[in-house]
Amino acid sequence: MLDADGYIFAFPENLAAISGVMKAFFDRAYYPCLGRIEGRPYALLICAGSDGANAVRQAERIATGWRLRKIANSQIILTAAQTPEAILAPKTIAEPELAQARELGTAMAEGLAQGIF
């Protein structure tokens, strides 16, 4: 985190919250990075079964605490997985959503390279 110029946080939403692994990352990184990464750009990519809004809220609060600068609207990719079988099944993200994610990555890279962020 300290060596990066910007961040794209990508993770699934589980039970209307940031996934456990991503939450553990934020828990471990929060205080060591506090006051040391202010102003850096960030964006969110979240994969959710039906909503994703609460995970966005949680991640944005963490980013606000770090004083990061949001550079794009959060992208929520909905899988519509609502049954136990669908939730546990491997997911395939459709090309339009993959294209949006690539565009976000490209925009972040170009903005950093040009000194915009």
Image (spheres, helix red, strand yellow):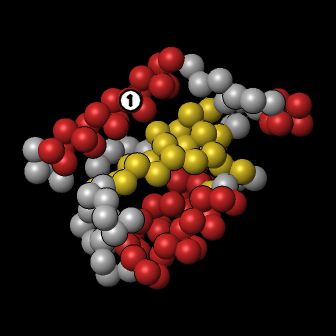
- Residue lying at 51% horizontally and 46% vertically, measured from the top left: 10
- Taking depth in this image into account, of 42 and 73 the one nearest to the observer is 42
Task: State which quadrant residue 73 falls in.
Answer: top left
Furthest-right residue in view? Answer: 84
Q: Is residue 11 found left or right of 36 in the rendered image?
A: right
- Residue lying at 46% horizontally and 51% vertically, measured from the top left: 9
Q: Which residue is mark 1?
A: 102
Task: State which quadrant residue 48 falls in.
Answer: top right
- Residue lying at 81% horizontally and 30% vertically, measured from the top left: 89
Q: Is residue 59 above or below residue 73?
A: below
Report x, y in % for residue 35. Answer: 32, 81
Q: Residue 70: tell me if it is visible.
A: no
Furthest-top residue in view? Answer: 95
Helix, strand or loop status at disc 1: helix
Label 1 sits on what residue type? Arg
Report x, y in % for residue 92. Answer: 65, 23
Q: Is residue 9 above or below residue 35?
A: above
Q: Is residue 63 above or below residue 18?
A: below
- Residue lying at 47% horizontally and 39% vertically, measured from the top left: 75
Report x, y in % for residue 3. Answer: 31, 64
> Number of numbered discs present?
1
Q: Residue 18: tell me if it is visible.
A: yes
Report x, y in % for residue 23. Answer: 62, 64
Furthest-front residue in view? Answer: 3
Figure quadrant of the N terminus: bottom left
Dot 1, how many residues are within 10 Å of its Cα: few (below 14), some (14-19), or many (20+)? Answer: few
Q: Is residue 89 found left or right of 98 in the rendered image?
A: right
Task: State which quadrant residue 33 falls in.
Answer: bottom left
Q: Is residue 100 above or below residue 56?
A: above
Q: Is residue 14 found left or right of 77 in the rendered image?
A: right
